[in-house]
Image (cartoon, rainbow, N blue to C red):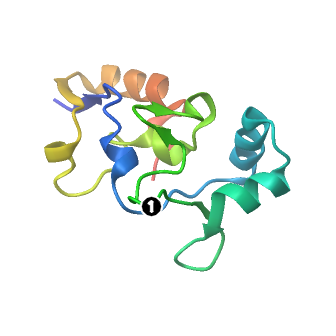
Amino acid sequence: MPIFWQCDRCTACCRWPGQVTFTEAELTRMALHLGLTEEAFIAQYTRVNAQRTGLALTDQADGSCVFLDGANCRIQPVKPQQCRDFPNLWNFPGFEKVCQAKPIDVSPIEWKQRIAQATGRDPGSAT
């Protein structure tokens, strides 16, 4: 049986070091959500990614996501796909020690349905 990780929005993943990348469409949605031009959004909230091939969201001084405000995500309705995919379509070794997502045994069909609902995409297209 596959395991679906039911997120309870503990924000542990938002506090984990790393980089959050995004597409041009996601950039547009995030800027619009915050009432900014894309240029202003880039200047205020992004940096060059580690591979120097594009942009990533900046971090707060403690390493958490720039959009984490206490226990809330300031861009929750338009957060990048990378964020929506955690922890079911990607995670890191030992994530379950810091992430409070609840493991749920489901059938393969139900797993696909839950993934589509949680991430907004077909799990067959996940890489």
Residue in the foreground of this view, choosing between 70 and 11: 70
Q: Which residue: 20% across, 58% down?
A: 93
Residue in the foreground of this view, choosing between 64 and 30: 64
Which residue does the numbered mark 1 point to in the structure image? 61
Image coordinates of residue 112 in percent, x first then y, are: 38, 28
Give the answer, above or below, for where 23 lies relative to 122. below
The answer to whether residue 124 is visible is: no
Q: Which residue: 30% across, 43% down?
A: 12
Picture quadrant where residue 85 is located:
top left
Q: Quadrant of the N terminus?
A: top left
**Residue 55 falls left or right of residue 125:** right
Q: Which residue: 57% across, 58% down?
A: 21
Image coordinates of residue 56 in percent, x first then y, are: 59, 62
Image coordinates of residue 84 in percent, x first then y, are: 47, 38
Q: Amino acid at mark 1?
A: Ala
**Residue 86 falls left or right of residue 93:** right
**Residue 44 falls left or right of residue 50:** right
Image coordinates of residue 17 in percent, x first then y, are: 36, 61
Where disc 1 sits, the SS reads: loop
Residues packed near mark 1 inside 10 Å, few (<14), some (14 to 19) or many (20 plus) = few
